[in-house]
């Protein structure tokens, strides 16, 4: 009879370690002294083809805490470069993350399983490779929330308290997150390939990425150009979806932008309360490089860095390669704009296209900015107007009458749609969340978990965020904006 450990088989199929020896260093996790499993994502476990009951055991805890390796794992730290706030670092890599291996999930998709915060790697650059518990729970909470919002993202399989202390400005409880992704290949991975100075190595990572993520590019006339266009489309759609929910990533460095178009790295990220395009949450973004309104332009900047690495592959004639990639780069903004409009139209109840829709949406954003109105609640309460009650939305504005003229224009535009009010309301409430990861609530539940050893508020909030579109009586505290403060809210990278 097999032991529980033998039954706990991840069935790893490790293509990265078998094919890309120049892009990683093998290493192991560091043990945790007295780990505790705080949260297991049972639904995700099933999706990955894993048995959640077996994972929710001492043997599973040993894996999630770095104390044991599952059979077939090939632990490694990936190597990559990156532009960090515009400055290039030729060697970054996974300084506190360990890729255990890849599984083929129930949808026949290849997925990475990675420990984050499991100790030093060759890329730790003097750091301890550990994570504090607060950032681990923060990433679990927000990444799973983003998933149910329909935004491509890395996922959280488990959160563990290690029982050890990590030294930051003070001693903090340690934690480890088990993260799942389509892959952890980033723009910075390609920059690292270029830094190696050999075209064959860039070709190897590109061919691997095409085969794994964009096989449709293989038979095109120019597979490497098509690959760039595919990545551009995935990232443009991702940023459009961020913008549609008021999400600010906070650290859009090229090493934090995956080629799959999944959100990665939930350190200095947050959702806006009052709409203001210049909103910055990251404590280290002193120049506002990654402010909310700058995210689309940073998208183009980052993808241009990817294009630079592909020049020798796109065409043997460098001038021709640059011309082809430049055309693709110039298409990124209209590509993004199309995705953004496709995200924003349903938020105001539109199912058809009109040339004046962009102006209508931007005018709403302008009066929201002037009126210091809450981004999330304005869109959610728009449907109340169709029920005959404009007061709930008007009270969100500093000067309630400031939205009157826009509401008239909007209802005139809706009348041309020809849909019933009930259908429009239903559609709008499916895309406009009532609950988001409000900053004050995030801090409140993390403080309880870290400082009071009380994880229940975190779990309660997680349950609310898993159904962000379903308004529940008694959950008003989760939908209300935080208290107004003269001190701007700041988030930190979590390292």
Image (spheres, rainbow, N blue to C red):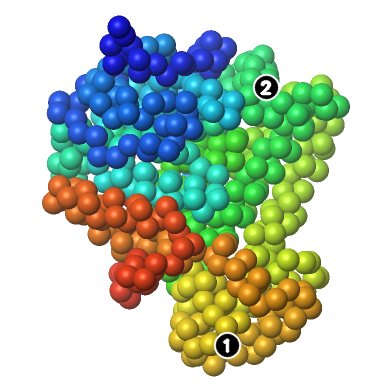
Q: Residue at x 19, y 30 (%)?
A: 35
Whether residue 382 is situated above or below residue 5 in the rendered picture: below
Q: Nearer the viewer, mark 2 or mark 1?
A: 1
Q: Position of residue 430 (x, y in %)?
A: 57, 62
Q: Position of residue 141 (x, y in %)?
A: 36, 48
Disc 1 target residue: 388
139 left or right, relative to 217? left
**Residue 353, picture quadrant:** bottom right
Tell me whether circle 2 and circle 1 mark residues in contact (CB < 8 Å).
no
**Crowding near pointer 1: few (<14 within 10 Å), some, many (20+)?**
few
In this orientation, does residue 167 appear? no
In the image, farthest residue toward the top: 1
In the image, farthest residue toward the bottom: 401
Q: Position of residue 102 (x, y in %)?
A: 49, 21
Q: Position of residue 74 (x, y in %)?
A: 42, 13
Disc 2 target residue: 211
**Residue 175, picture quadrant:** top left
Question: In the rendered structure, which disc, 2 or 1, sits on the residue that comes first in sequence?
Answer: 2
208 left or right, relative to 91? right
In the image, farthest residue toward the front: 1
In this orientation, does residue 103 appear? yes
């Amino acid at each position: 009879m097999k032991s529980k450990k033998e039954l706990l088989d991840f069935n790893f199929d490790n293509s990265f370690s078998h094919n890309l020896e120049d892009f990683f260093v093998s290493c192991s996790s560091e043990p945790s002294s007295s780990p505790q499993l705080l949260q297991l994502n049972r639904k995700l476990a099933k999706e990955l083809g894993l048995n959640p009951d077996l994972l929710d055991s001492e043997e599973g805890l040993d894996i999630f805490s770095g104390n044991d390796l599952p059979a077939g794992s090939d632990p490694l730290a990936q190597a990559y470069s990156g532009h960090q706030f515009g400055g290039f670092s030729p060697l970054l890599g996974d300084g506190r993350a360990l890729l255990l291996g890849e599984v083929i999930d129930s949808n026949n998709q290849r997925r990475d399983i990675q420990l984050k915060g499991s100790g030093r790697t060759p890329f730790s650059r003097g750091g301890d490779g550990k994570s504090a518990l607060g950032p681990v729970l923060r990433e679990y909470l927000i990444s799973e929330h983003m998933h149910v919002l329909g935004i491509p993202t890395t996922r959280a399989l488990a959160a563990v308290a290690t029982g050890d202390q990590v030294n930051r400005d003070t001693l903090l409880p340690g934690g480890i997150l088990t993260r799942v992704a389509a892959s952890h290949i980033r723009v910075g991975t390609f920059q690292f390939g270029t830094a190696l100075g050999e075209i064959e190595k860039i070709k190897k990572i590109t061919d691997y990425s095409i085969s794994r993520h964009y096989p449709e590019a293989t038979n095109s006339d120019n597979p490497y150009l098509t690959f760039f266009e595919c990545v551009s489309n995935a990232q443009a759609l991702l940023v459009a979806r961020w913008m549609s929910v008021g999400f600010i990533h906070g650290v859009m460095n090229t090493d934090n932008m995956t080629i799959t178009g999944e959100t990665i790295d939930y350190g200095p990220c947050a959702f806006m309360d009052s709409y203001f395009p210049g909103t910055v949450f990251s404590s280290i973004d002193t120049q506002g490089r990654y402010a909310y309104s700058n995210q689309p332009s940073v998208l183009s900047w980052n993808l241009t860095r990817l294009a630079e690495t592909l020049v020798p592959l796109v065409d043997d004639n460098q001038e021709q390669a640059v011309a082809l990639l430049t055309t693709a780069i110039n298409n990124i903004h209209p590509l993004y704009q199309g995705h953004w409009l496709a995200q924003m139209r349903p938020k105001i109840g539109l199912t058809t296209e009109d040339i004046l829709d962009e102006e209508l949406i931007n005018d709403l954003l302008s009066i929201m900015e002037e009126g210091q109105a809450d981004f999330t609640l304005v869109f959610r309460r728009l449907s109340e107007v169709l029920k005959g009650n404009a007061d709930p939305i008007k009270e969100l504005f500093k000067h309630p009458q400031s939205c009157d003229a826009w509401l008239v224009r909007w209802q005139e535009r809706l009348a041309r749609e020809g849909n019933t009010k009930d259908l429009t309301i239903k559609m709008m409430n499916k895309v406009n969340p009532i609950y988001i990861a409000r900053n004050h609530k995030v801090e409140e539940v993390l403080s309880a978990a870290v400082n009071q050893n009380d994880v229940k508020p975190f779990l309660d909030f997680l349950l609310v965020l898993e159904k962000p579109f379903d308004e529940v009586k008694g959950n008003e505290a989760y939908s209300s904006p935080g208290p107004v403060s003269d001190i701007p809210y700041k988030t930190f990278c979590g390292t």
